[in-house]
Image (cartoon, helix red, strand yellow):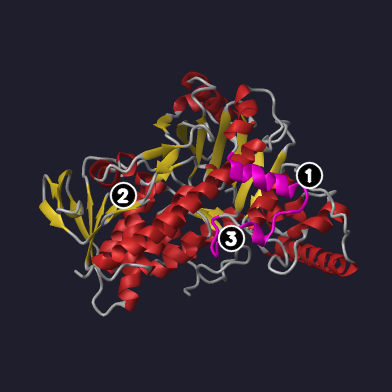
Amino acid sequence: MRPISKIVIVGGGTAGWLTAGTIAAVSRAQDAHPLQITLVESPNVPIIGVGEGTWPTMRRTLKRMGVRETDFIRQCEASFKQGAKFARWVTGDADDFYYHPLVLPQGYFETNLVPYWLEKTNDRSFSSRVCPQEHLCEAGLAPKKITTAEYDAVANYAYHLDAGKFAPFLQSHCIENLDVNHVLADVTGVRALNNGDIAAIETQQAGEISGDLFIDCTGMRSLLLGGHFGVPFKSCKDVLFIDRALAMQVPYEDLASPVVSHTISTAQKAGWIWDIGLQSRRGIGHVYSSSHCSDDLAENRLRAYVRSLGHDPDALAARKISIEPGHREKFWAGNCVAVGLSAGFLEPLEASAILLIEIAAQFIAEQMPASRSAMDVVARRFNETFLYRWARIIDFLKLHYVLSKRDDDPFWIDNRREETVPESLRDLLELWHYQPPWHDDFDRAVEVFPAASYQYVLYGMGFHTEASPRGLSPNLASQAATLMERNEVEVRTMLGTLSPNRELLDKIVRYGLAKV
């Protein structure tokens, strides 16, 4: 019945500090005696620092922690992200692209617009017909105005950020405003209790640090969950082939250069290239399968992409990162839970890594066990929930590859082999040949990717759903037509009132946004 009062987070970076800030903010808001939170990180292990895309959930996360959006944008080189543009994923042709926007389709919780779009209006892309965001991205516009309050939006948005600046920013906020205790020390061992729980971590510089709950944010090393508890790693390389990344920081021509307000993901023969715009530079990287492409060839393709932008890639360094796609067989064992890379990693497609950190930290904060006796129940819930979420993310990422029609490289052909496609995804694709994705296809109250995300990818990539043999009712057709007309009005209004992304970012840096 020992109460849980001391939380020890081992490892810093985005995972450690987001987790510390989330738990501290929730505890301070609801507990008369807030949790004691200590974050221990090595002074000798650098953070990876290339996770530069978020989901819109980050707005709520930062607001809950008491972070001013203006400060975040100024100090983390942050820019607005309104979704992702996938180029050359279907046929590989120069004009082949589609969007996965962050705005839900018009009337999303009442009306499924897919049947009407398929029957009446598929002369234009699905996303452009059902929400304004593709139009905003193509026009280079921001998702809000300088008069829009912090964290509020005209069009839903997430962020691109400098990961190397984000972790120190969070660290400063957590220490100064949320009373998180920061210890710089190298972990040398674990002192365990008879039941296997961690009593304390042993460190070189600070001696023993005891706690009631330990959160493993030690990255791919997984010192606690994998090392002490021996929880095995489950590879998914048989489904997702990407296992290498080359990252490069590319400067703008000048500080007046446009800042694109979406991630650009351009398919290559054995992988794809990401391209995101920050305030003073672009983050560009190539992820690929080492089974289908050599490191040298991948770097040549990355440098060719940068050269096509008008830059000299020979003056820039490319950083190589190895990826082992997969996750731990469970994420909470004893009195230890893994968050971030220590739990697993897939690939940067659709920016799921930071999202998983956020929702894991939120789960821990909101369901923090009162005592060790209650912890096993919370742990079982956590493991069940997150095994489901990882499986759905794997399905969603694989969907992008399965729907491609490219046949110019074995990478794309191999991705369509039936034995590489999870049975759960095969079942959904079979269903969606006859009826479009909708809410009941996903049985959890909170899904990482809702039905709308599947709709944008499926119909952006040319997936065919048969028309219902029962036809489209006049009432439903009328509702859908009204919603699409509303969308056209919103598009015209937003195109006429929103400013370029660069212009808004410059104003925020200079003047700041209105406080909430």
What residue is rendered at 51% in x and 47% in y? 391
In the rendered view, tell whether residue 327 sits above or below residue 28.
above
Q: Which residues are magenta?
A: 422-448
Percent of width and height locating residue 218: 29, 45
Identify the image quadrant of residue 9: bottom left
Is residue 429 on the magenta stretch? yes
What residue is rendered at 69% in x and 25% in y? 407
Percent of width and height locating residue 199: 16, 55
Q: Amino acid at mark 3?
A: Asp
- Circle 1 Cα neighbour tier, 10 Å, few/some/many (<14 / 14–19 / ≥20): some
Residue 443: mark:
3
Percent of width and height locating residue 261: 59, 51
Is residue 155 on the magenta stretch? no
* Residue carrying label 2: 217
> Which of the pair 148/6 is nearer the observer?
6
Identify the image quadrant of residue 310: top right
Per the model, the C-alpha gap separating discs 3 and 1 is 24 Å
Whether residue 22 is visible, yes or no, is: no
Secondary structure, mark 3, is loop
* Left or right, 209 with reference to 320: left
* Residue carrying label 1: 464
Identify the image quadrant of residue 495: bottom right
Q: Check the image and name the residue furthest to the bottom.
A: 32
What residue is rendered at 41% in x and 69% in y? 64
Q: Amino acid at mark 1?
A: His
